[in-house]
Image: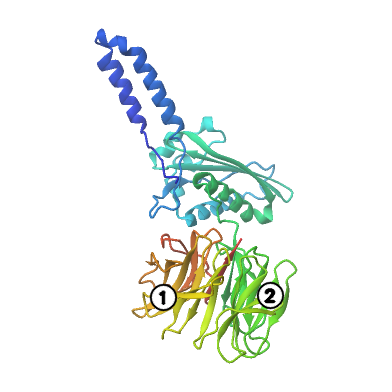
Amino acid sequence: MMKSKLRSIPRTWIYNLFDFLFHVLLPCPLNRLLLPGCLLFLSVFILYSSTAFAVIYIDIDSPSVRKFKIAVPDFTDRSYDARHHDLTYRLSGVIKNDLYLSGFFQPMDKGAFLQGGKAADSMGSINFKDWSVIGADLLLKGAYQCVGNSLTVDMRLYDVFWARQIVAKRGLGTITSYRYLMHRLGNEIIKKLTGHPGMFDTKIAFVSNGTGHKEIYISDYDGYNVRRLTYDKGIDLFPRLSPNGKRIMYNSYKDGGPMLYIRDLVSNVSRRISSRPGLNIGAAWMPDGKKAALTMSNNGNVDIFLIDLNGRILRRLTNYWGIDVSPSFSPDGKKMAFVSNRSGSPQIYVLDLTKNTTKRVTFNGHYNTAPAWSSRNQIAFMSFNNGMFDICSIDEDGGHFKKLTCDQGKNEDPCWSPDGRYIMFSSNRTGHYHIYIMTANGRNQMQITTMKGDQTSPSWAP
């Protein structure tokens, strides 16, 4: 397990060793015999401290990780003209926001930077003392060049204390897609410091009623580059992005009752796949992206069925007198979490699809619903208790219960990042419902969407 190792051996220790060597040991003639051994020890100590402890590692599974203060000056424009000089702050702004949303970094205010916050173009000309004085742990500097519509960005990350380069990357893209380019470079930083891929180039889908109708939208994970997918001028609900992010299922009332549709995000073609009498709601993709679970009531009772992408029923998954809804599959597709009122109130159950056994897993709170199963085998859900909805999480067997939100309005509709390390959810803590992001342990809760009206029911995919 990788851990944070910043300033593990302060340089003052090295200075004190030199002082002890030359002012205490050497004045004594007998101790001069120890000089070769002392020098050898000191050399090994300095070499070890400057290599093994010069790189910052972040343990992203730690319950609490100290945020590293990072200075990100405006990027240097190396273009032959100044037509895109605004990218100096746009590029740095994107990556600062990415690092902030990750929960591991605290970008510093540019007003605190010395010498106007300019970072030199080469490591040898960087005055690391200026950045250390203001408390920076890390320095991220970049430069870019525009040729036509092409954009080249060079980025370097430094450990300020050790005056050492940690990451050096070059990214190529287009000016119009500069945000995507910076997301990719931000992922490189996360991968280097944690050993795990970043989430910055992922997409989310959600419902918004800003037009007066509930329509489906898609955006980057950070709420930017919003694109409206449906124009049904009615009620569209429950968007669910496929495991590869290339398709989306959703419910629409445009042709009457709640029917299930699937849309190809490449061709932008939608088709209806389930329009049986009664309910056809809350579809959940199987991990292979070839099948889905769907709640239907065409047989009279409300149960969950497995269907293919043409809507053909493959298997009845639940068969109980109560109401069974909100399916979500385990990463291996062998189990399914769902909500049932068979015990009297809505609770979360886990169905083993191989053994055909069902087990109740929630007992905290009298109303638990909307389970979402992560790629790391945790289940997030919304729980109603003391008059409020909050986001909680449990293991698949119901253990390790955690309440992730508290006393901040109504918190609903949790969904996981593809890597299972972040949760998005909707909350009305500021009045209207907006989409928020937080780490899997509930830390670093921040608002993502700022659109007019309410944004709810997020879905997250690569």
Residue 297 lies, with reference to residue 189, above or below; the image says below
Q: Residue at x 34, y 17 (%)?
A: 38
Marker disc for residue 227: none
Residue 279 lies, with reference to residue 384, above or below; the image says below
- Foreground residue among 457 and 114: 457
Q: Position of residue 173 (x, y in %)?
A: 69, 50
Q: Horizontal placement of 135 versus 191: left or right?
A: left
- Foreground residue among 79 and 128: 128
Q: Residue at x 27, y 15 (%)?
A: 25
Q: Residues within 10 Å of mark 1 (few under 14, many from 20)?
A: many
The reply to whether discs 1 and 2 touch (Cβ–Cβ < 8 Å) is: no
- Foreground residue among 395 and 152: 395
Q: Horizontal placement of 360 versus 325: left or right?
A: left
Q: Amino acid at mark 1?
A: Ser
Q: Position of residue 316 (x, y in %)?
A: 60, 80
The colour scheme applied to this rendered structure is rainbow
Upstream in the sequence, badge 1 or badge 2? 2
- Residue 48 lies in quadrant: top left
Q: Position of residue 221 (x, y in %)?
A: 56, 62
In what element is the residue under mark 1? Answer: strand
Q: Amino acid at mark 2?
A: Asp
Residue of label 1: 383
In what element is the residue under mark 2? Answer: strand
Q: Residue at x 57, y 76 (%)?
A: 208
Marker disc for residue 308: 2
Residue 363 lies, with reference to residue 424, above or below; the image says below
Question: In the current view of this chain or complex, which residue is farthest to the bottom?
Answer: 300
Is residue 138 visible in the rendered image? The answer is yes
